[in-house]
Image: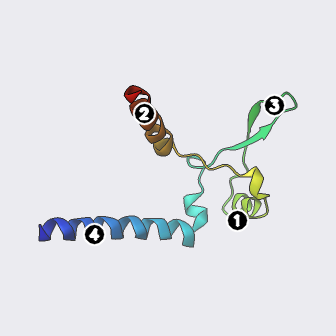
């Protein structure tokens, strides 16, 4: 049991360290693979925009100066978990 507790603590510490890495160096965490920029068209649809990907931090500073209502966080993991929980909940009724 003690070895298991040490493993859990090590895994939690590793996750915390990786999370802080993104906070300390956002230009390494905000890559074209992790961030997509969309603009709402006049008909209400979302169109993906080409982001300016340079290492001077233009995307990062753009996010910093954006209005809070204009930024949406999406996580595929959280979306999958919510779909799973909805399926479980609808199966019980």
The residue closer to the viewer here, 69 or 48, is 69
The residue closer to the viewer here, 67 or 14, is 67
Which quarter of the image is occupied by the C terminus? top left
Residue sticking out furthest to the front: 93
Label 2 residue SS: helix
Q: Quadrant of residue 7?
A: bottom left
Mark 1 and 3 residues: CB-CB less than 8 Å, in contact? no
Give the distance between the C-alpha atoms of the residues marked 3 and 2, in whole angstroms: 32 Å
Closer to the N terminus: mark 1 or mark 3? 3
Q: Quadrant of residue 60?
A: bottom right
Label 3 residue SS: loop
Which quarter of the image is occupied by the N terminus? bottom left
Q: Quadrant of residue 61?
A: bottom right
Q: Position of residue 74 (x, y in %)?
A: 58, 46
Label 1 residue SS: loop
Q: Position of residue 8 (x, y in %)?
A: 25, 65
Nearer the observer: mark 1 or 3; the answer is 3
Q: Position of residue 26 (x, y in %)?
A: 59, 65
Q: How many marks?
A: 4
Give the distance between the C-alpha atoms of the residues marked 1 and 2, in whole angstroms: 47 Å
Closer to the N terminus: mark 3 or mark 4? 4
User: Above or below — where is 57 with respect to 90?
Assistant: below
Closer to the N terminus: mark 3 or mark 2? 3
Nearer the observer: mark 1 or 2; the answer is 2
Judge left or right: residue 62 versus residue 43: left
Mark 3 and 2 residues: CB-CB less than 8 Å, in contact? no
Q: Which residue is mark 4?
A: 10
Closer to the N terminus: mark 4 or mark 1? 4
Closer to the N terminus: mark 1 or mark 2? 1
User: Above or below — where is 90 with respect to 67?
Assistant: above
Q: Which residue is mark 3?
A: 44
Q: Which residue is mark 2?
A: 89
């Amino acid at each position: 049991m003690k070895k298991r507790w040490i493993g859990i603590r090590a895994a939690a510490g590793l996750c915390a360290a990786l999370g802080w890495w993104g906070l300390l160096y956002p230009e390494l965490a905000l890559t074209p693979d992790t961030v997509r920029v969309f603009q709402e068209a006049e008909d209400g649809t979302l169109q993906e925009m080409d982001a300016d990907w340079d290492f001077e931090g233009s995307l990062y500073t753009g996010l910093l100066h954006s209005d809070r209502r204009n930024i949406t966080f999406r996580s595929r993991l959280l979306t999958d978990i919510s779909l799973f929980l909805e399926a479980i909940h609808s199966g019980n009724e």
